[in-house]
Amino acid sequence: MKDMKISTQNILKELATNYPDQTAFRKNVIESTAKSMGYTGKDFYPMLTAETRVKIGTYDLSALLKTIEVDRKVVDISSAAKMQSIVNEEKSFAKADPTFVPWGAFHDVVKMIKSEMFYPVYVSGLSGNGKTFMVEQACSKLNREFIRVQINPETDEDDLLGGFRLINGETVFSKGPVLKAMENGAILLLDEIDRATNKIMCLQGILEGKPVLVKKTGETITPAPGFNVIATANTKGKGSEDGRFTAASIIDEAFLERFTVAIDQKFPSPSIETKILNNHMTKFGVEDTDFVEKLITWADIIRKTFYDDGVDEVISTRRLCHIAQTFSIFKNRAKAIDLCIARFDDDTKSAFLDLYSKVDAGVETLDTTEDENGETA
């Protein structure tokens, strides 16, 4: 094996590091380890030979492992277990937001959290309809520690569970947010979980609510009472067929199956959304109930058209709140709307503005010319 590629050697080292007392591996373990390091089949296939196969799907790599040098300080569980583990002791609590209006599944989420059961929840729904905000405010209401982890395609075991860090000249294992939430009995929010790759499979055992062995240190973490996991996503983990959420991934079925319940969050009703928008108007120091009423009617028409496949875009609750904020700056309804929907393509933007002019017959036509002082006319 003198000519063994560096990439193959690195994969073997990672296997030896992660599984120090193991020499036989399932193919899926070898493959997932390689892919987590950015390698492809050509890098790990050299290990999967007739000589190394001991049974279908299992390969004995003991001969290959003897050819590599591994840092025994990491591999040796007895040594690793003695290595110092640290965790950020700072606790985080969500603050109550005066603009929040309880609606939808909020009271159900409060009951779930209040029960202090381990009860994983998967919340899905279109962007901007308050999924994360709902969980945050439920934790605020119950004064529960709230740890939010933003998931992206690069999120891996090191980000979630922790990893070795060099601190003051010493190598220590720094526990990640997931282990911190377990030990503190906190609510762990995995935000935008459908942006993850198979690297989040490291959470499989944690989603069962049982003690978890940290393989890099040999330490067993037992979840404290009250620990729970809530995930939010734009999709139900099956990808985005309509292409609206191109970064959404297909989540492993075994992973999804570990969530006890799923909540499909829709946009709030017009009456609830009116309260939300009025609260935001007050927050930004403006009062215009007529404008709020017109915006709610306008957004409701667009959503109904969207659900009927009449348009490709939708006005979210978050977008309406952005319009309220922009209106507080410019005091011009048309300009506030124009600026806040400028991200849409020209045809969609024009159609939405035209629709609003029909809903609000008294709205001024936006004139983008500026006077000598830079003020919009």
Image: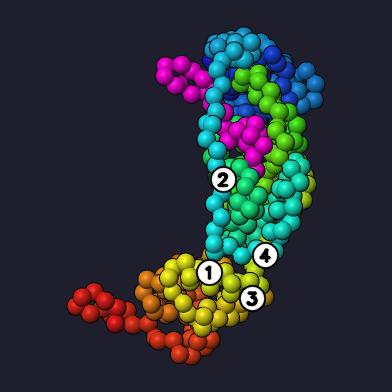
Instruction: Name the kind of residue labelled 1 in the image.
Output: Asn
Pointer 3 and pointer 1: residues touching (CB < 8 Å)?
no
Instruction: Name the kind of residue labelled 3 in the image.
Output: Ser
Badge nearest the viewer, 2 or 3: 2
Q: Residues within 10 Å of mark 2 (few under 14, many from 20)?
A: some
- The secondary structure type at the circle numbered 1 is helix
First-in-chain label (2 vs 1): 2
Question: Residue drawn at (63%, 57%), measured in percent from left and top?
Answer: 134
- The secondary structure type at the circle numbered 3 is helix
Instruction: Work out whether residue 213 or residue 307 is closer to the camera in this orientation and state it.
Output: 213
Pointer 4 and pointer 2: residues touching (CB < 8 Å)?
no
Q: Residues within 10 Å of mark 1 (few under 14, many from 20)?
A: many
Gap between marks 4 and 2 measured at Cα: 21 Å
Gap between marks 4 and 1 measured at Cα: 14 Å
Badge nearest the viewer, 4 or 2: 2
Number of marks: 4
For disc 3, the marked residue is 271
- The secondary structure type at the circle numbered 2 is loop
Badge nearest the viewer, 4 or 1: 1
x and y, in percent, of residue 211 in the image: 73, 28
Which of the 4 image quarters holds residue 241? Answer: bottom right
Gap between marks 3 and 1 measured at Cα: 13 Å
For disc 4, the marked residue is 103
